[in-house]
């Protein structure tokens, strides 16, 4: 009887093809929208995660100036409170640190032959390579010798290499930074764009002392990047850095910090929570169309029950029981949900790829939303088909046979 009921349901659907397609359309659009919206949300989540991870693993950032609160401005000169000696003290006195790299940064125009390019020049130490998970594709990175002698050497990103040295190897070539000559000693491997759309390969790295004394003319540092030994000690390292810097800067208990210590693990957790909420919101909005599709199924099933009242009466007169009639119409509703759900999966996956290719958005397709959307579409068909099926099963056979 089960397979016979499926055959009857399919025959009823194929007998009214246009009506069946229009009924399925709500389910198709709903499932497709859920998959596409969730894939966009998860794409945003992955991009943010990759962007934070690209900064370095187990990373703690120390920057000058207190964390700004609403309506309160930082004190004048608060962005000059960190020095190289602070970084050396952190490396010497705080346990659980793998690497530490103080750095300064400023935009300059770079000239190589007849080509020029404006980019960010980063002055830092050799440990920056490990702290920020960078790799050198050709040549070498800056050394401690370069730091001590303030050498005019530079390591450039792949974007700089392609724009200033198209077709030739940059290693060994000379460039001018703010009209000062520098020798290119290495090229970094490409890291692509960050989550904010910033080109991470559009950078030049020079020795910290060279940047401070020969380019910018400062004695302080703008950022201290600290890499903890592992994720378990990050909170303790952050607390120890905060305590050490307060002591070094002579900050009493009643005064606020003149620096900010950020743990990127907590930033990552916050970003994941935010993007998960966005994904859930997008999926929930799309799921509303599934409910609309379910109402369409109920509507068409009620029409079907009315049209086939005499058929129901004949089946009951020939011995069909309550459960037989109920199963017949329930299966018909579920078949609409199954076919609509399967078609919606194809539509959703296709839409995700189209959005990714045309809009350039990052989309991530995973099995869970596909299975969830398909299961929901079947459940919708079952739920909204139950009332019409029960109404058909409760028809009096005499009244049904007399129905015109």
Image (tube, helix red, strand yellow):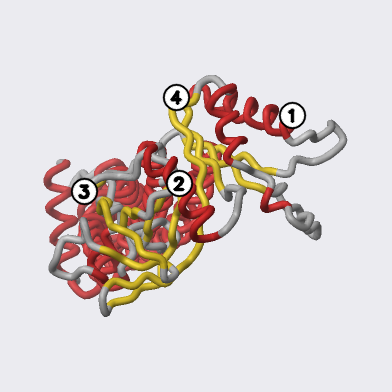
Q: Which residue is mark 1?
A: 247
Q: CA distance from mark 1 to mark 4?
A: 23 Å
Q: Image quadrant for the C terminus?
A: bottom left
Check disc 3 and report its element: helix, strand or loop.
strand
> Tag 2: Cα neighbours inside 10 Å, few (<14), some, or many (≥20)?
many
How far, Cα to Cα, is label 3 from label 2? 18 Å
Residue 33 in sight from this viewpoint:
no
Frontmost of labels 2 and 4 is 2
- The answer to whether 332 appears left or right of 268 in the picture is left
Residue under circle 3? Answer: 139
Residue for badge 4: 229
State the residue at coordinates (37%, 39%).
145
Tell me the SS state at disc 4: loop
Residues marked 1 and 3 touching at CB (< 8 Å): no
Q: Which residue is mark 2?
A: 124
State which quadrant residue 192 falls in. Answer: bottom left
Task: Note whether 317 is above or below 85 in the view shown.
Answer: below
Which numbered disc, 1 or 4, marks the residue that appears first in the sequence? Answer: 4
Quadrant where the image shows the N terminus: top left
Rendered position, 93 above or below 351 = above
Horizontal arrangement in the rendering, residue 2 relative to residue 143 (left or right): left
Q: Position of residue 276 (x, y in %)?
A: 47, 47
């Amino acid at each position: 009887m089960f397979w016979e009921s499926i055959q009857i349901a399919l025959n009823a659907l194929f007998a009214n093809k246009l009506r069946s397609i229009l009924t399925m359309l709500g389910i198709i659009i709903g499932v497709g929208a859920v998959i596409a919206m969730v894939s966009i949300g998860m794409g945003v989540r992955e991009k943010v995660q990759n962007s934070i991870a690209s900064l370095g693993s187990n990373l703690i950032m120390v920057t000058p100036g207190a964390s700004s609160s609403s309506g309160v401005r930082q004190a004048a000169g608060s962005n000059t409170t960190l020095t190289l000696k602070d970084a050396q003290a952190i490396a010497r006195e705080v346990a659980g640190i793998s690497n530490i790299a103080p750095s300064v940064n400023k935009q300059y125009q770079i000239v190589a032959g007849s080509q020029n390019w404006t980019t960010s020049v980063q002055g830092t130490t050799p440990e920056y390579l490990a702290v920020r998970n960078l790799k050198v594709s050709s040549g070498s990175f800056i050394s401690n010798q370069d730091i001590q002698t303030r050498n005019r050497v530079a390591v450039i990103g792949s974007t700089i290499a392609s724009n200033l040295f198209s077709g030739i190897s940059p290693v060994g070539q000379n460039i001018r930074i703010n009209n000062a000559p520098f020798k290119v000693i290495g090229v970094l491997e490409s890291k692509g764009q960050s989550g904010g759309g910033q080109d991470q390969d559009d950078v030049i790295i020079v020795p910290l002392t060279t940047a401070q004394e020969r380019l910018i003319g400062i004695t302080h540092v703008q950022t201290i990047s600290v890499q903890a030994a592992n994720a378990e000690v990050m909170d303790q390292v952050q607390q120890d850095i905060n305590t050490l810097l307060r002591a070094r800067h002579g900050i009493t208990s009643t005064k606020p910090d003149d620096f900010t210590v950020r743990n990127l693990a907590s930033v990552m957790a916050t970003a994941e929570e935010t993007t998960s909420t966005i994904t859930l919101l997008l999926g929930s909005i799309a799921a509303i169309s599934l409910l609309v599709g379910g109402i369409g199924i109920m509507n068409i099933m009620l029409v079907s029950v009315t049209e086939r009242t005499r058929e129901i009466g004949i089946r009951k007169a020939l011995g069909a029981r309550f459960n037989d009639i109920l199963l017949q119409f329930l299966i018909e509703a579920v078949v609409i949900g199954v076919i609509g759900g399967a078609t919606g999966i194809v539509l959703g996956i296709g839409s995700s790829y189209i959005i990714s290719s045309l809009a350039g958005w990052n989309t991530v397709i995973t099995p869970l939303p596909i299975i969830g959307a398909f299961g929901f579409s079947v459940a919708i068909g079952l739920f909204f088909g139950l009332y019409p099926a029960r109404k058909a099963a409760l028809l009096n056979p005499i009244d049904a046979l007399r129905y015109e």
